[in-house]
Amino acid sequence: MKVSIRTEKRVKGLRLKTLKETLIKFLRMLDLEGVEVSVFLCSDETIRELNRIYRNKDKPTDVLSFELNENVGKFTLLGEIVISLDTAKRQAQELKHSLEEELKRLLAHGLVHLLGYDHEKGGEEAKLFFSLEGWLLSGEENKLYHPTR
């Protein structure tokens, strides 16, 4: 599996290696060997532009996911997770936890979207989405529990 993380700007104290390890753990929990995921950490300005172009919403958001699901050689390109560092910092303060903890939450959220789930549909889809997200964040690598469609 391959995980790449790019940043638009550096953030003092932010350890990209830790974020990469977190995403790799999530992929292992899901038994997703042979996949590639890209992560882009950006500003509110950049994510607002992406949100406007791709979702017709002219405002910043915390995370966007761009699902690809394309086979290239030995890998399946799952897609890209884009996270606003500005919004993540604000949310971390509001929720009274670290920026790394908030980024972990947003990585899980973005990854579940890359897998094709959408909480905005409501009902059972939302239940399944948040169940899978919660399981990833729990870090329990119990293969007996693996929420799927």
Image: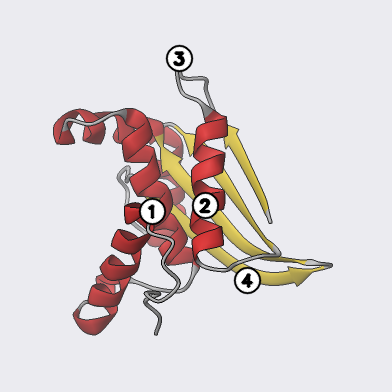
Name the disc covering residue 69, or none.
4
User: As rendered, which of 110 and 86 lies closer to the eye?
Assistant: 110
Confirm or deny contact between disc 2 and disc 3 (CB under 8 A): no
Residue, far top:
12
Q: Is residue 136 above or below residue 128?
A: above
Report how far apart the C-alphas of labels 3 and 4 lie in the structure.
33 Å
Q: Is residue 58 left or right of residue 45?
A: left
Confirm or deny contact between disc 3 and disc 1 (CB under 8 A): no
Q: Nearer the viewer, mark 1 or mark 4?
A: 1
Circle 4 residues within 10 Å: few <14, some 14–19, many ≥20: some
Along the polypeptide, which appears first: circle 1 or circle 4? 4
Report how far apart the C-alphas of labels 1 and 4 lie in the structure.
24 Å
Report how far apart the C-alphas of labels 1 and 2 lie in the structure.
8 Å
Tag 3 residue: 12
Which residue: 15% across, 32% down? 94
User: As rendered, which of 85 and 44 lies closer to the eye?
Assistant: 85
Q: Is residue 15 above or below residue 79?
A: above
What's the amino acid at mark 3? Lys
Q: Secondary structure at mark 2?
A: helix
Confirm or deny contact between disc 1 and disc 2 (CB under 8 A): yes
Along the polypeptide, which appears first: circle 2 or circle 4? 2
Tag 1 residue: 139
Which residue: 47% across, 34% down? 42
Report how far apart the C-alphas of labels 3 and 1 lie in the structure.
26 Å
Q: Secondary structure at mark 3?
A: loop
Which residue: 66% across, 65% down? 33
Residue 52 visible? The answer is no
Name the disc covering residue 25, or none.
2
